[in-house]
Image (cartoon, rainbow, N blue to C red):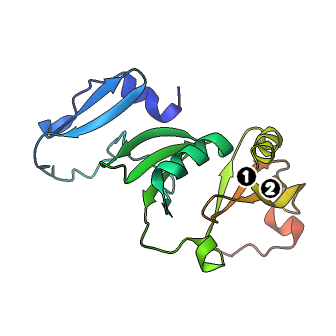
Amino acid sequence: MHPLLESATATSARTRGGNSAIQRKGTRFTAIRTGPATPRPYNGRMTTNRSVPTDTVLPHIMYQNIAEAIAWLTRVFGFTEHYRYGAPVSGSQMFAGKACIMIKGAPDQASPSQLGYGTQSLTIFLDNVAAHYDKTRAAGATVVEELHETVYGELQYGVVDLDGHHWLFSQHAHDLSPDAWGATIAKR
């Protein structure tokens, strides 16, 4: 089980506030709105929310065809779907290694492949990047940067997905100080 879901299985299926519920069907969870959300006052403490991971960046990536993107990211990159929403589906949260991403349908916006240039690059850290590289290459993905060790101590490769988004998959190979490879560390 993914670490972000461990607390979800230990708690009730009903969410706080009585405004929504979560139905479980096997290993799949579906959120159901049962009434308008009532915001609770902020108490100054960190709140746990099983829908949004904390202490990380949660990128939102737009795709022309969301159902096709979910299938492709699962098959080629090995991502796992946490949940999806909308009817028809308009978005999904997926686990990518130890990270989480949101993907959204945006059929009225141009994708990087339609634009002819990248709009961002995302790096996902993995425990075994070499095995991931082999799986991704075997699945027919377009590798744009072969697996190699960088000057800054990462074993990584680059690939573009079905809509032209650029991804780096990386694994720490060496613990190097930035000044060891020529970077300047900011003075604080």
* 188 displayed left or right of 157: left
**Quadrant where the C terminus is found in the figure:** bottom right
- Residue at 85% of width from left, 49% of height from top? 174
- Mark 2 lies on a secondary structure that is strand
Which of the two residues, 75 or 150, is positioned nearer the viewer here? 75
Q: Is residue 148 above or below residue 166?
A: above
- Residue at 78% of width from left, 44% of height from top? 129
Q: Position of residue 13 (x, y in %)?
A: 26, 26
Amino acid on which disc 1 is placed: Phe
Q: Is residue 64 above or below residue 5?
A: below
- Residue at 11% of width from left, 49% of height from top? 36
- Residue at 74% of width from left, 58% of height from top? 159
Distance, label 2 to label 1, CA atoms, is 6 Å
Q: For residue 26, which numbered disc appears in the image? A: none
Q: Is residue 154 above or below residue 95?
A: below
- Mark 1 lies on a secondary structure that is strand
Mark 1: give few (<14), some (14-19) or many (20+) Cα within 10 Å.
many
First in sequence, mark 2 or 1: give its number. 2
Q: Are marks 2 and 1 in contact (CB under 8 Å)?
A: yes
Q: How many discs appear?
A: 2
Q: For residue 157, which numbered disc appears in the image? A: 2
Badge 1 is on which residue? 169
State whether residue 78 appears in this view. no
Mark 2: give few (<14), some (14-19) or many (20+) Cα within 10 Å.
many
Q: Position of residue 34 (x, y in %)?
A: 13, 39
Q: Position of residue 124 (x, y in %)?
A: 66, 51
* 116 displayed left or right of 149: left
Which of the two residues, 112 or 177, is positioned nearer the viewer here? 112
State whether residue 74 appears in this view. yes
Q: Position of residue 184 (x, y in %)?
A: 78, 76
Amino acid on which disc 2 is placed: Tyr
